[in-house]
Image (spheres, helix red, strand yellow):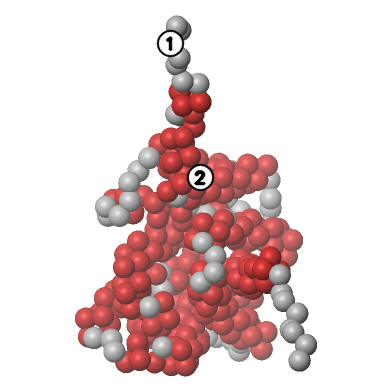
């Protein structure tokens, strides 16, 4: 019998890293396109933000529930009542806040939405320090300030939709970003204990129920028929939302959180480019400058949070004394 050909280790490593990177690239493209699709739905239909958010979360819940039953049925059935309550409260911050994102996106531009949401790493770091889960450093402060100043420069150079609607939309997006940051900080422990699939399924399910009740109470009745294209767009938003969780989970199985964080910095860039190309939104010098500062500040916050970052700075500071020791003359 002839021996089987051996696959070089370098080749197998390249193949094993291609799939997680492809999943991560899919996350970037899906999150970038979802924002544009939601804006398109608001521009060409009378669907209310809370109704769209409820339908989006409901589709995501059905998708995740089916996958959890297939992969982690025991984990889902073993949850206690207190676990459901905790996941419901944490899910309110992260999943129910999609309604705020929809309201904000309805009354502001996609570019402004992307810029404000680009403050997520900075907001997450601030809340993490306030909750005692992290420590502040000089480089983190510099990154946070750089992102905030860049966002102000990019957003407040003009109001494309009128002064009142412009301010309301941006405030909703900022509140949504802060709620997502709180969700990330507060959910880390319970998600790690109960599992990613089980936790996201319960959070989506509880938030879907709350959004459904809210849509019955506050959503206005539709005065016109919804076209098949609009319905397909809403279904895409829901499926893409669930797919993002699965693709990010698959990428984190093989890639470091630092790599995932680096790719996430591409989301506001891709969103702004797509909004400029397909929605005709204005892109001026202030937007480019401020957007660059937001992304650079987010990357600085991320790298400053790595353990190797402080050790590298420490080695740089001590390099000269260690490499040029003092020798006494004989």
Residue labelled with disc 1 = 328
Residue name at image x 68 percent, y 45 percent: 284
Where residue 130 appears, as percent x and y from the top left, is 28, 51
Residue 14 in view here: no
Quarter of the image that includes the N terminus: bottom right
Quick one: label 2, few (<14), some, or many (20+) residues within 10 Å? many
SS at circle 1 = loop
On residue 83, the disc is: none
Residue name at image x 61 percent, y 45 percent: 292
Question: Is residue 278 positioned above or below 6 on the image?
Answer: above
On residue 300, the disc is: 2
Where residue 30 appears, as percent x and y from the top left, is 61, 71
Residue 1 in view here: yes
Mark 2 or mark 1: whose residue is earlier in sequence: 2
Is 188 placed left or right of 17 in the picture? left
**Extreme-left residue of the structure:** 82
Mark 2 or mark 1, whichever is nearer to me: 1
Residue name at image x 42 percent, y 48 percent: 307
Question: Is residue 122 positioned above or below 81 on the image?
Answer: above
Question: Is residue 70 positioned above or below 86 on the image?
Answer: below
Quarter of the image that includes the C terminus: top left
Question: Is residue 284 positioned above or below 197 on the image?
Answer: above
Quick one: label 1, few (<14), some, or many (20+) residues within 10 Å? few
Between 39 and 141, the residue placed more toward the observer is 141
Instruction: Give the image quarter of residue 321.
Output: top left
Q: CA distance from mark 2 to mark 1?
A: 42 Å
Where residue 204 appears, as percent x and y from the top left, is 41, 81
**Extreme-right residue of the structure:** 2
Residue name at image x 33 percent, y 78 percent: 194
């Amino acid at each position: 019998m002839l021996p089987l050909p051996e696959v070089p280790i370098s080749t197998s490593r390249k193949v094993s890293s291609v799939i997680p990177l492809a999943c991560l690239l899919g996350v970037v493209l899906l999150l970038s396109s979802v924002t544009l699709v939601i804006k398109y739905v608001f521009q060409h239909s009378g669907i209310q933000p809370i109704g769209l958010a409820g339908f989006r979360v409901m589709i995501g819940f059905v998708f995740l529930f089916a996958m959890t039953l297939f992969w982690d049925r025991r984990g889902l059935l073993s949850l206690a009542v207190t676990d459901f309550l905790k996941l419901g409260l944490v899910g309110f911050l992260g999943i129910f806040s999609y309604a705020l994102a929809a309201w904000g996106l309805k009354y502001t531009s996609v570019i402004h939405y992307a810029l404000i949401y680009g403050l997520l790493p900075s907001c997450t770091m601030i809340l993490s320090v306030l909750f005692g889960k992290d420590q502040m450093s000089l480089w983190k402060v510099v990154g946070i300030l750089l992102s905030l100043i860049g966002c102000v420069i990019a957003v407040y150079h003009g109001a494309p939709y009128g002064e009142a609607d412009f301010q309301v939309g941006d405030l909703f997006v900022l509140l949504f970003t802060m709620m997502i940051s709180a969700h990330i900080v507060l959910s880390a422990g319970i998600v790690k204990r109960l599992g990613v699939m089980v936790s996201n399924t319960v959070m989506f399910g509880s938030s879907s129920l709350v959004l459904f009740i809210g849509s019955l109470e506050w959503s206005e009745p539709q005065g016109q028929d919804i076209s098949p294209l609009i319905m397909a767009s809403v279904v895409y938003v829901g499926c893409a939302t669930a797919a993002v969780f699965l693709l990010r989970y698959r990428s984190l199985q093989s890639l470091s959180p630092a790599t995932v964080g680096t790719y996430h910095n591409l989301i506001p860039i891709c969103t702004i480019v797509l909004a400029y190309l397909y929605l005709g939104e204005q892109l001026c010098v202030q937007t480019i400058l401020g957007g660059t500062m937001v992304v650079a500040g987010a990357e600085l916050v991320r790298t400053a949070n790595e353990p190797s970052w402080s050790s590298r700075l420490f080695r740089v500071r001590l390099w000269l004394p260690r490499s040029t020791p003092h020798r006494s003359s004989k």
